[in-house]
Each structure stands twice: as C-alpha cells, then as structure tokens.
Image (tube, helix red, strand yellow):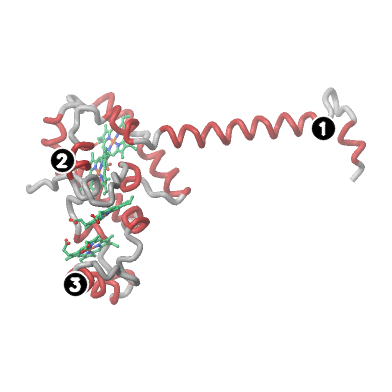
Amino acid sequence: MNWRALLKPSAKYSVLALLIVGIVVGAVGFFATQQTLHATSTDAFCMTCHAGHSLKDEVLESPHGANSAGIVVQCQQCHIAQEPFNYLVKKIVVSKDIIGYLTIDGFETQEWLEENRKEQAELARNYLRSIDSSTCQNCHNRIYEDPSPEMKKMAVRMHAMNFKKAPEDRKTCIDCHKGVAHPYPKN
Ligand code: HEC
Ligand code: HEC
Ligand code: HEC
Ligand code: HEC
C-alpha cells in the first residue's frame, strides 16, 4: 500500500478525507441510535403512553417495587429482552404500538386497561414465553443450579423438579408465576 495515495486527491477530495467523513457520519449514527434506544427504555417513556394506567403503582406495590432490598424493577427489565438482537426486535415490534396509541379508542383510560387486561396480559405472556422468560432469569439467575439457602423449601423443590426435565419440556418462569408485578386478571 502506498500511503501517499491516501493523501492524493481522488477526483476532488483525498481518499483520506472521504474516509474521515465516513467515520464521523458512522459514529454520529451509531451514538444516535444508542441514545434513542436508551431514552426509549425508561419507565417515564413507557408511561407517556400508559399515562392513564395504574401500571407503575402496581409495580410499586408488588414484590418488584416494595422489597427489603430497596429495588424497583423497571418496566423494560421485565418486558424487553436485554440481549442486543432480541432487544432490537422487540423495539421494532413496540414501535407498532404508536399506531395502536393513535387508533385505539379510549386507550389512555384506566377503564380501557381493566376491560382489556386479560387480552393484554396474554400478549405480554406470549412474548415472555417466546424468549423463555429470559428477562426474569437475568436477575433470578440462581433459581435452578445454585438456590440461595434462604429460599423456601417448597420453591427449591418445585424449581429442581422443573430443571430435571429435558429443556424442551421445562416450564418457563411465567407459566408458574402469574401477576408478579400487576394484579393478574381473574377471568
Ligand atoms: C407509543 C405509545 C406507547 C409506548 C411509548 C409504550 N406503549 Fe405499551 N402499549 C401501547 C399500546 C397502544 C398498547 C396496546 C397494544 C394493542 O393491543 O394493540 C400497549 C400494550 C402494552 C403491553 C401489553 C401487550 C403486549 O404486546 O405485550 C405491554 C406489556 C406494554 N405495552 C409495555 C410497555 C413498555 C414496557 C413500554 C416502555 C418500554 C411501553 N409499553 C411503551 C402503547 C405504548
Ligand atoms: C431487575 C431484576 C428483576 C427482574 C427482571 C425480575 N425480578 Fe423477580 N424479584 C426481584 C427482586 C429484587 C425481588 C424481591 C426479592 C426480595 O423481596 O427479597 C423479586 C421477587 C420475585 C418473586 C418472589 C415474590 C414474592 O412473592 O415474594 C418472584 C416469584 C419473582 N420475583 C419472579 C419474577 C419473574 C417471573 C420475573 C419475570 C417476569 C421477574 N421476577 C423479574 C428482581 C427481579
Ligand atoms: C413448575 C413451576 C415453577 C416454575 C417453572 C418456576 N417456579 Fe418459581 N416458584 C414456584 C413455586 C411453587 C414457588 C413457591 C411459592 C411461591 O413463592 O410462589 C416458587 C417460588 C419462587 C420464588 C420465591 C422463592 C423464595 O422463597 O424466595 C422466586 C424468586 C421464583 N420462584 C422465581 C422463579 C423464576 C425466575 C423462574 C424461571 C427461571 C421460576 N421461578 C420458575 C414454582 C415455579
Ligand atoms: C417484575 C416484572 C415486571 C415489571 C417490573 C413490569 N411488568 Fe408489566 N407484566 C409483567 C408480566 C409477567 C405480565 C403478564 C401478566 C401477569 O403475569 O401479570 C405483565 C403485563 C403487563 C401489561 C398487560 C396488562 C396486565 O396488567 O397484565 C402491561 C400493559 C404492562 N405489563 C406494562 C408494564 C409497565 C408500563 C411497567 C412499568 C411501570 C411494567 N409493566 C412493569 C411483568 C412485569
């Protein structure tokens, strides 16, 4: 490689100049997406559309908001797969909710949530099933192989029985645990 060639004007600009422009543009684009993804992952962002819904208060009253550890689990920590690829996929799926937000009559009201909670809960559960409740497992990562000595005997036994099965026969967390953050609808 002749380094001089890099500095020579191509048609109008030197190859080096073009390269630098390319890197700058690429970097701006990269950080812009990182920033947007970040900004769209806060509870405040979720609650801009779900503003009329009691979802955040429900979390605060649940073991995921009121615990002795002083941890409040965020919406996206449960609802959006944290692996980069799945994260992007879910983000793109969620962006369809903009259309729902604009077109569903009365979406912003608590009445709408109560009337549709069952259906919405199943949608949320189907998504979690499709990722094998990986979001739950990110935090609860000692459930199966290394349960804490404080865990209830009954819980240790149930989890061990499930873990003994072949991976494809195992239940996923949300099959057994309903309503860990919101009241699970009765009917
Ligand atoms: C642009 C407005 C908007 C934003 C922002 C938004 N949502 Fe929603 N969300 C909706 C609408 C509309 C529905 C109902 C979708 C339907 O049934 O078509 C919904 C439904 C849901 C559901 C149940 C249905 C499902 O597909 O799982 C969950 C869970 C959910 N949202 C979580 C979140 C979380 C977590 C965030 C923040 C990362 C968020 N939402 C941000 C508009 C929004
Ligand atoms: C960001 C970390 C985090 C995520 C994600 C998370 N949890 Fe938790 N979970 C906790 C913490 C912290 C507690 C409270 C522990 C305590 O009270 O000592 C808890 C408590 C629990 C409990 C015990 C509740 C009780 O009644 O005492 C269950 C069951 C549970 N989580 C299941 C789940 C399931 C299912 C998911 C996925 C939908 C999930 N968790 C996602 C951190 C998390
Ligand atoms: C086969 C059903 C089943 C599956 C699958 C299951 N659990 Fe459980 N789990 C139970 C039962 C039963 C208990 C004890 C009663 C209770 O606390 O709800 C329990 C208790 C717990 C507790 C509280 C334990 C304690 O004593 O502190 C946590 C946290 C928990 N499970 C998380 C999970 C997570 C995360 C997954 C997925 C990796 C999971 N469970 C999968 C049945 C199950
Ligand atoms: C600890 C995990 C966890 C957290 C934190 C959490 N959710 Fe959920 N969410 C679930 C699960 C699991 C379901 C499926 C239904 C069920 O089991 O209650 C659900 C269901 C929903 C639904 C469908 C309606 C319903 O009540 O079932 C919406 C909408 C929703 N969540 C939005 C949110 C928003 C917004 C936040 C943040 C303020 C949030 N969630 C925080 C786990 C969580």
Residue 151 screen position, x and y as percent = 23, 67
Mark 2 vs mark 3: give the one in front. Answer: 3
Say whether residue 99 is left or right of residue 179: right
Q: Is residue 100 above or below residue 79?
A: above
Circle 2: is it few (<14), some (14-19), or many (20+) Cα within 10 Å?
Answer: some
Mark 1 vs mark 3: give the one in front. Answer: 3
Whereabouts is ligand 4, in terms of quadrant? top left
Q: Report the amino acid beneath label 3.
A: Lys
Alpha carbons under labels 1 and 2: distance apart: 58 Å
Q: Which mark is residue 117?
A: 2
Residue at label 3? 153
Circle 3: is it few (<14), some (14-19), or many (20+) Cα within 10 Å?
Answer: few
165 vs 54, nearest the viewer? 54
Q: Report the amino acid beneath label 2.
A: Arg
The secondary structure type at the circle numbered 1 is helix
The secondary structure type at the circle numbered 2 is helix
Residue at label 1? 15
The secondary structure type at the circle numbered 3 is helix
